[in-house]
Image: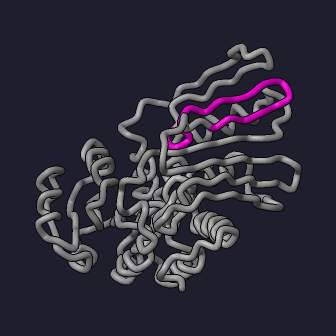
Amino acid sequence: MKIGILGTGRIVDMVAPTLMQMDHAECYAIASRTLQRAKDAAEKYGFKKAYGSYEELAADPEVELIYVATPHSRHYEDMKLCITHKKPVLCEKSFTMNASQTADIQKLSQQSGVFAAEAIWPRYMPSRAIINEMIGSGIIGKITALTANLSYAIHHNYRIMAPELAGGALLDVGVYGINFALMHFGDEIQRIDSSVQMTDTGVDGMESIILHYKDGRMATLTHGIFSRSDRKGIFYGDKGYIVVENINNPQSVSAFDSEDRLLKQVHVPQQISGYEYEFEECMAAVRAGRREADSMPLSESLRMMEIMDSIRRQWGLIYPQEK
């Protein structure tokens, strides 16, 4: 399938090499708002075509799926452009800036019959089923809580610190912690408590989020942009605990008893980078004429954005475009 990439952000340095190693994907075209940047990326990764505008990419009749790699603040308009041109679209997380924009994309996709999905890679990975199988096996007894953290020292990146680009920890890394909780605990949430440390630029720099579930379970999540965390997800049961190494791209899942003895360990299958799974599923869905991805339907993207909207309301964080 001929893949077009809209944008030349840093994520392309991970995605393009992955596509190059996939059997059923072709790095066909890439677009930037600056033609030279598109040409540089095309030369680096072997794209056949380079465009100096997003409109040219969307209008190319050969492009079969467009991956959106622009900042959060542009996702909504860039997806609208693709869908208007009848181009299936896979958009990097977070899907949009807010739930209202996601609802609009969902409606536009349904009305036009054009595929749209969020590229939140842990949703598509084999690790998701591995984790759910282990926690469902009863190996650590009744599970009542989970913790997950994801922090990187990325505050020197302008995009991360810029309110006008919908920067901050929540939409960039917090989305992984919340997704981790929803994938493995579900979304029957009764209450959300949170605490935040804002940056001088007006975006969230560090946060702690507690999801209180209706059945009494709790998920405690921490995210930040100033330091590197261990990135672990841990499930707590009355007979032990389960550790997931790196909730962003899980590498292993290990169960321990109440005396800290290893009971079971499962490593994830060998992979190119982890990004290949979202492309494989979405390409298959497009070929089959489906409008959504099974692993991340638009209703789930909308639920995620509603949760993040509610958290931002607790903080009073409003992006400039929302005012």
- What color scheme is it? one colour
- Left or right: 124, with 165 as reference point: right
The reply to whether residue 310 is in sight is yes
- Left or right: 300, with 145 as reference point: left
Image point (26%, 61%), residue name: 8
Residue 86's place in the image compared with 90, above or below, is below
Residue 102's place in the image compared with 255, above or below, is below
**Residue found farthest to the right:** 215
Q: Who is closer to the viewer here, 316 or 74?
A: 316
Residue 50's place in the image compared with 206, above or below, is below
> Quarter-wise, where is residue 115 in the image?
bottom left
- The stretch in magenta equals 233-249
Q: Position of residue 236 (x, y in %)?
A: 77, 33
Q: Who is closer to the viewer here, 38 or 89?
A: 38
Q: Quadrant of the C terminus?
A: bottom right
Image point (72%, 13%), residue name: 261
Q: Quadrant of the N terminus?
A: bottom left
Image point (16%, 63%), residue name: 37
Q: Who is closer to the viewer here, 72 or 80?
A: 72
Q: Position of residue 286 (x, y in %)?
A: 42, 64
The reply to whether residue 299 is in sight is no
Q: Position of residue 178 (x, y in %)?
A: 63, 54
Residue 316's place in the image compared with 169, above or below, is below
| Residue 47 part of the magenta segment | no
Q: Position of residue 50 (x, y in %)?
A: 15, 66
